[in-house]
Image (cartoon, grey):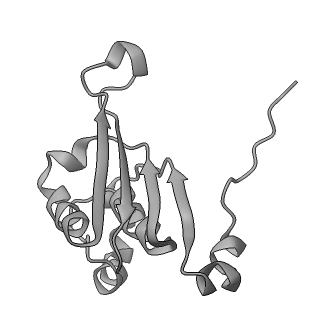
Protein backbone atom coordinates (compact mmCIF):
# COMPACT_ATOMS: atom_id res chain seq x y z
CA UNK A 1 0.00 0.00 0.00
CA UNK A 2 1.46 3.35 -1.03
CA UNK A 3 1.60 6.07 1.58
CA UNK A 4 -0.38 9.14 0.70
CA UNK A 5 1.47 12.39 1.21
CA UNK A 6 -0.57 14.92 3.19
CA UNK A 7 0.58 18.11 4.86
CA UNK A 8 0.62 17.77 8.63
CA UNK A 9 0.05 21.46 9.21
CA UNK A 10 -2.43 23.45 7.22
CA UNK A 11 -2.30 27.27 6.96
CA UNK A 12 -5.96 27.34 8.01
CA UNK A 13 -4.92 26.05 11.44
CA UNK A 14 -2.71 29.09 12.00
CA UNK A 15 -5.69 31.31 11.25
CA UNK A 16 -7.96 29.51 13.73
CA UNK A 17 -9.04 32.29 16.09
CA UNK A 18 -10.21 29.84 18.76
CA UNK A 19 -6.64 28.60 19.27
CA UNK A 20 -5.25 32.09 19.74
CA UNK A 21 -8.19 33.19 21.87
CA UNK A 22 -6.84 30.60 24.31
CA UNK A 23 -3.27 31.88 23.99
CA UNK A 24 -1.91 29.58 21.25
CA UNK A 25 -1.04 25.93 20.79
CA UNK A 26 -0.08 23.64 23.66
CA UNK A 27 2.53 21.85 21.53
CA UNK A 28 4.38 22.55 18.28
CA UNK A 29 6.37 19.65 16.82
CA UNK A 30 8.13 19.70 13.50
CA UNK A 31 10.99 19.04 11.18
CA UNK A 32 11.48 22.41 9.42
CA UNK A 33 13.16 22.35 6.04
CA UNK A 34 16.77 23.39 5.77
CA UNK A 35 16.70 25.92 2.95
CA UNK A 36 20.00 27.62 2.27
CA UNK A 37 19.96 31.34 2.91
CA UNK A 38 21.02 32.19 -0.65
CA UNK A 39 17.68 30.90 -1.92
CA UNK A 40 15.57 33.40 0.03
CA UNK A 41 17.72 36.53 -0.30
CA UNK A 42 14.81 38.55 -1.77
CA UNK A 43 12.82 37.94 1.44
CA UNK A 44 15.53 39.08 3.86
CA UNK A 45 14.25 42.68 4.20
CA UNK A 46 10.88 41.28 5.27
CA UNK A 47 12.53 38.81 7.65
CA UNK A 48 14.59 41.62 9.17
CA UNK A 49 11.41 43.58 9.88
CA UNK A 50 9.56 40.62 11.40
CA UNK A 51 12.08 38.28 13.05
CA UNK A 52 14.46 38.82 15.98
CA UNK A 53 16.53 35.81 14.90
CA UNK A 54 17.64 37.33 11.60
CA UNK A 55 21.22 36.70 10.58
CA UNK A 56 22.36 37.11 6.98
CA UNK A 57 23.75 33.58 6.81
CA UNK A 58 20.97 31.70 8.68
CA UNK A 59 19.13 28.85 7.02
CA UNK A 60 15.34 28.93 6.94
CA UNK A 61 14.86 26.59 9.90
CA UNK A 62 16.19 29.31 12.25
CA UNK A 63 13.12 31.41 11.49
CA UNK A 64 10.91 28.36 11.97
CA UNK A 65 11.99 28.28 15.60
CA UNK A 66 10.81 31.83 16.18
CA UNK A 67 7.53 31.19 14.36
CA UNK A 68 7.02 28.00 16.35
CA UNK A 69 7.50 29.89 19.61
CA UNK A 70 5.01 32.55 18.50
CA UNK A 71 2.39 29.87 17.86
CA UNK A 72 2.73 28.48 21.40
CA UNK A 73 0.76 29.58 24.40
CA UNK A 74 2.91 30.55 27.42
CA UNK A 75 4.17 27.31 28.91
CA UNK A 76 3.60 25.44 25.62
CA UNK A 77 6.16 22.93 24.36
CA UNK A 78 8.14 23.10 21.10
CA UNK A 79 10.31 20.34 19.71
CA UNK A 80 11.99 20.33 16.30
CA UNK A 81 14.31 17.93 14.54
CA UNK A 82 16.97 20.04 12.81
CA UNK A 83 20.66 20.08 12.03
CA UNK A 84 22.90 21.13 14.92
CA UNK A 85 24.71 23.83 12.94
CA UNK A 86 22.82 26.63 14.75
CA UNK A 87 24.56 25.57 17.99
CA UNK A 88 28.05 26.29 16.60
CA UNK A 89 27.78 28.68 13.64
CA UNK A 90 27.75 32.45 14.09
CA UNK A 91 24.33 32.65 12.45
CA UNK A 92 22.96 30.84 15.50
CA UNK A 93 23.86 33.68 17.89
CA UNK A 94 20.58 35.62 17.40
CA UNK A 95 18.71 32.35 17.92
CA UNK A 96 20.67 31.64 21.13
CA UNK A 97 19.76 35.12 22.37
CA UNK A 98 16.10 34.61 21.41
CA UNK A 99 15.99 31.34 23.35
CA UNK A 100 17.64 32.86 26.41
CA UNK A 101 15.11 35.71 26.46
CA UNK A 102 11.90 33.98 25.41
CA UNK A 103 12.14 30.27 26.22
CA UNK A 104 13.22 27.73 28.76
CA UNK A 105 15.33 25.12 27.00
CA UNK A 106 14.42 21.85 28.67
CA UNK A 107 16.81 19.66 26.69
CA UNK A 108 18.80 19.38 23.49
CA UNK A 109 19.62 15.93 22.19
CA UNK A 110 22.53 16.16 19.78
CA UNK A 111 23.02 13.10 17.58
CA UNK A 112 26.01 14.61 15.78
CA UNK A 113 28.22 11.87 17.19
CA UNK A 114 25.90 9.06 16.07
CA UNK A 115 25.94 9.17 12.28
CA UNK A 116 25.71 5.39 12.14
CA UNK A 117 22.35 5.57 13.97
CA UNK A 118 20.75 8.58 12.28
CA UNK A 119 22.43 8.39 8.87
CA UNK A 120 23.00 12.15 9.11
CA UNK A 121 26.12 14.17 9.80
CA UNK A 122 24.43 16.49 12.28
CA UNK A 123 21.09 16.29 14.02
CA UNK A 124 19.74 17.99 17.14
CA UNK A 125 16.37 17.63 18.83
CA UNK A 126 15.74 20.63 21.10
CA UNK A 127 12.79 20.52 23.49
CA UNK A 128 11.79 23.89 24.94
CA UNK A 129 8.97 25.68 26.67
CA UNK A 130 7.74 29.14 25.77
CA UNK A 131 8.29 31.61 28.54
CA UNK A 132 5.42 33.88 29.53
CA UNK A 133 5.94 36.38 26.71
Callout count: 0
**Position of residue 35 measured from the top left corner of the image (x, y, whole percent):** 40, 53
Which residue is at 33% across, 71% downward? 131
Residue 125 found in image quarter: top left
Residue 52 found in image quarter: bottom left
Which residue is at 23% across, 50% downward? 86
Which residue is at 41% across, 22% downward? 118
Which residue is at 34% across, 34% downward? 123
**Residue 53 as seen in the image, left or right of residue 90:** right
**Position of residue 16 measured from the top left corner of the image (x, y, whole percent):** 69, 80
Examine the rendered structure and indicate whether residue 122 appears above or below residue 93.
above
Examine the rendered structure and indicate whether residue 49 appears above or below residue 34.
below
In the image shown, does 1 or 20 lie closer to the viewer? 20
**Residue 127 as seen in the image, left or right of residue 30:** left
In the image shown, does 133 or 85 lie closer to the viewer? 133
In the image shown, does 111 or 72 lie closer to the viewer? 72
In the image shown, does 97 or 19 lie closer to the viewer? 19
**Residue 11 as seen in the image, left or right of residue 128:** right
- Location of the C terminus by quadrant is bottom left
- Location of the N terminus by quadrant is top right
**Position of residue 114 measured from the top left corner of the image (x, y, whole percent):** 31, 18
Residue 104 found in image quarter: bottom left
**Position of residue 47 measured from the top left corner of the image (x, y, whole percent):** 34, 78
**Residue 113 as seen in the image, left or right of residue 8:** left
Q: Residue furthest right?
A: 1
Examine the rendered structure and indicate whether residue 62 appears above or below residue 125.
below
Amino acid sequence: MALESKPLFHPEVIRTPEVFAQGGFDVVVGNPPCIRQELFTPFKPWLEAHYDTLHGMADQYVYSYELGMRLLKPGGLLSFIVTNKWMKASYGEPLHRFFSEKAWVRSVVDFGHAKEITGLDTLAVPDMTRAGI
